[in-house]
Image (cartoon, grey):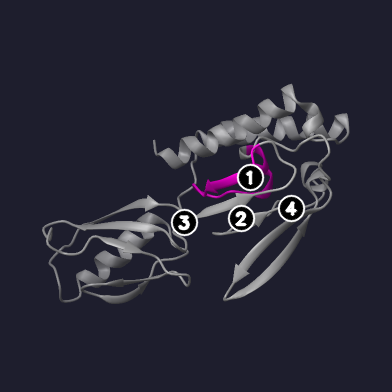
Amino acid sequence: MSVEFWRRVLSKALLLFLLLVYPGAYPCSAAENAMLKEQIKGQVVGDTQAPLAYIIGPQNVLQIKIFGDASANQIYRVDELGYIRHALMGTIKLGGMSVSEAEKLIEAKLADGYFIDPHVTIFVLEHSRFSVIGEVRKPGTYEILGKVSIIEAISMAGGFTDVANVKKIKVIRKETGKVRLIQANAESIIGGNSPDIELAAEDVVH
């Protein structure tokens, strides 16, 4: 199984561990904690059966191998809008696609006048990243492997400190050159009253 799959499983297992060992990291009611523990257990078990595909994002570095054409440039960085400029096919948008979808798209384009029955393999050499700052135990920058939500991001950063205000979380996001501020309430998310928010490349959780 892929590294992305195991990273996602381990991140959920870490969150469950923090809830069991450091209950003060998530200062909500016992009922809410119990609900979250059961939810995380179910997600960990579910993920072992259906890992999520990695979605290509801005600043990813991709190695694109075309079987039978070792001379072609193989390394490409995805720009802020999700595009690469390929030596044979020109500008192609891969951002927002899974790796397998991107492989099929390039194969289809290569089959249109370039190769007979082309075979393409894409490796993600550098993943998208997000940062977690503020009152968490391990602030820093982390890779987006698969899909990462706010709660998963906090768990990857070691959980909240005892003085964190879990009801006021901000996600700072850059969109088409502008900065967008997203407000979130971790206690409400944990309690099942608000949907969790999926992070995007270069997000800052604070």
Q: Bounds of the magenta span?
A: 138-155
Figure check: 62 above or below 178 = above
Task: Identify the amino acid type marked 4.
Answer: Pro
| Residue 141 shown in magenta | yes
Looking at the rendering, which quadrant does residue 101 occupy?
Answer: bottom left
The residue pinned by badge 2 equals: 199
Dot 4 and dot 1 residues touching (CB under 8 Å): no
Looking at the rendering, which quadrant does residue 187 occupy?
Answer: top right
Dot 3 and dot 1 residues touching (CB under 8 Å): no
Callout 1: few (<14), some (14-19), or many (20+) C-alpha neighbours within 10 Å?
many
Task: Identify the amino acid type marked 2.
Answer: Leu
Label 2 vs 1, first from the N-terminus: 1
**On the rendered structure, is 69 left or right of 30?**
left
Instruction: Look at discs 4 and 2 and give the one toward the viewer.
Output: 2
Task: Identify the amino acid type marked 3.
Answer: Ile
Give x and y (percent) for residue 28: 86, 36
Mark 4, secondary structure of its residue: loop
Instruction: Look at discs 3 and 1 and give the one toward the viewer.
Output: 1
Q: Nearer the viewer, residue 16 or 168?
A: 168
